Image (cartoon, rainbow, N blue to C red):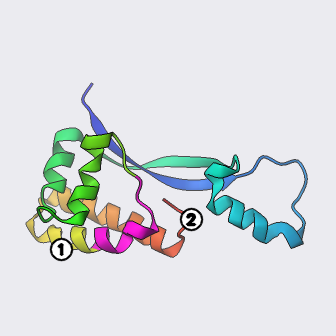
Amino acid sequence: MSEKVVFSQLSRKFIDENDATPAEAQQVVYYSLAIGHHLGVIDCLEAALTCPWDEYLAWIATLEAGSEARRKMEGVPKYGEIVIDINHVPMLANAFDKARAAQTSQQKEWSTMLLSMLHDIHQENAIY
């Protein structure tokens, strides 16, 4: 079995509760969802993009050498995983958009998919 890099995207969060939340407390629930890891909220992730390992490395090599975006994406081979959240959206979107000129058709397809995921994060910053 060959190694792959899988981009998972938050698809939903929920709190296991038996009673309906009163309207007055709804903002507290929304805040709880935003910081869910601290309150026992369950995150549901779905695979959104899968790349073979060697092709992932070639793809991120199209990003500007020494750039913050490239260092971020090099976290996968270095640490085994990375988290992309609202703070990374502008930097990564600009870098992958710029890199498309030097990418293969497959890499451009992955960049388009990643840019779509970044757009989702920008629209709803609770997504990561």
88 falls in the magenta region: yes
Between 109 and 128, the one lying in front of the other is: 128
Q: Residue at x 26, y 42 (%)?
A: 78
Answer whether residue 51 is visible to the viewer in this image: no
Residue 50 spot, x, y in % from top left: 32, 46
Q: Is residue 121 above or below residue 59?
A: below
Q: Amino acid at mark 1?
A: Lys
Between 88 and 20, the one lying in front of the other is: 88
Our reading of the magenta stretch's main secondary structure is helix
Answer whether residue 41 is visible to the viewer in this image: yes
Residue 15 spot, x, y in % from top left: 74, 51
Residue 63 left/right relative to 116:
left
- Numbered circle sitting on residue 71: none
Which quarter of the figure has residue 114? Answer: bottom left
Q: Quadrant of the N terminus?
A: top left
Q: How many marks?
A: 2
Rounded to the nearest angstrom, the CA distance separating label 2 from label 1 is 26 Å
Would you name the residue on which mark 2 appears?
Answer: 126
Which quarter of the figure has residue 118? Answer: bottom left
Can you name the residue that lies furthest to the top here? Answer: 1
Q: Which residues are magenta?
A: 83-93
Q: Amino acid at mark 2?
A: Ala
Residue 105 left/right relative to 40:
left
- Numbered circle sitting on residue 98: 1
65 falls in the magenta region: no
Q: Earlier in the sequence, mark 2 or mark 1?
A: 1
